[in-house]
């Protein structure tokens, strides 16, 4: 199945995006970074929606596995733990997989186009934050 090939790298890239937004959200919360209320609300909204990706990731991994619930939890305990937002930065321990995933995904025409759009939006957001 094609989704089984591209889904894990996609989740790794989403995890990197989530960690970056999480750092921004924490910086906003402790007043290290000052942004307008709509930008802060957008960051928090995106963080909530990305939680759906991680929950869907667990559901798909369970569906694709040949193990029962107990075996699945034993073999994927780290991924289950990182669904909890405060433990998600531990995914940085797997940064090599994330970089490899980003290279693999950017080679795809559809995903490469999406990454270019995301890159453009991030650039626009960065310009707004600087001004």
Image (cartoon, grey):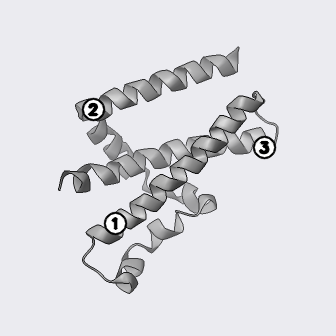
Mark 2–mark 1 Cα distance, whole angstroms, equals: 23 Å
Q: Which mark, residue 29?
A: 3
Going by the picture, which residue comes out furthest to the left?
A: 1
Which circle, 1 or 3, is nearer the viewer?
1
Q: Which residue is at a point 70% across and 14% down the rendered structure image? A: 131
Going by the picture, which residue comes out furthest to the top?
A: 131
Contact flag, marks 2 and 1 (Cβ < 8 Å)? no
Above or below, 32 against 16 in this view is above
Q: Which residue is at a point 47% across and 61% down the rendered structure image? A: 55
Ranked by sequence position, the earlier of labels 3 and 2 is 3
Above or below, 51 against 115 in this view is below
Please tell me how crowded label 1 is: few (under 14), some (14-19), or many (20+) other residues with Cα within 10 Å.
Answer: some
Going by the picture, which residue comes out furthest to the right?
A: 31
Mark 1–mark 3 Cα distance, whole angstroms, equals: 33 Å
- Whole-percent x, y for residue 35 in the image: 75, 28
Contact flag, marks 3 and 2 (Cβ < 8 Å)? no
Q: Which mark, residue 110?
A: 2
Q: Which mark, residue 86?
A: none
Q: Which residue is at a point 45% across and 29% down the rendered structure image? A: 118
Ranked by sequence position, the earlier of labels 1 and 3 is 3
Please give left or right for residue 9 compared with residue 39 in the image: left
Contact flag, marks 1 and 3 (Cβ < 8 Å)? no
In the rendered image, the quadrant that contains the N terminus is: bottom left
Q: Is residue 96 visible?
A: no
Q: Which residue is at a point 64% across and 60% down the rendered structure image? A: 86
Above or below, 99 against 38 in this view is below
Which circle, 3 or 2, is nearer the viewer?
2
- According to the image, label 1 marks what residue? 61
Q: Tell me the SS state at disc 1.
A: helix
């Amino acid at each position: 199945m094609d989704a089984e090939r591209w889904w894990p790298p996609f989740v790794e890239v989403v995890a990197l995006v989530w960690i970056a937004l999480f750092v921004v959200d924490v910086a906003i919360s402790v007043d290290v970074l000052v942004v307008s209320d709509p930008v802060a609300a957008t960051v928090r909204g995106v963080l909530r929606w990305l939680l759906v990706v991680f929950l869907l990731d667990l559901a798909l991994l369970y569906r694709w596995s040949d193990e029962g619930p107990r075996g699945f939890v034993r073999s994927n305990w780290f991924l289950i733990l990182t669904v909890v937002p405060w433990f998600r930065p531990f995914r940085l321990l797997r940064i090599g997989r994330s970089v490899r995933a980003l290279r693999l995904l950017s080679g795809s025409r559809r995903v490469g186009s999406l990454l270019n759009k995301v890159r453009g939006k991030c650039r626009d957001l960065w310009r707004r934050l600087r001004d």
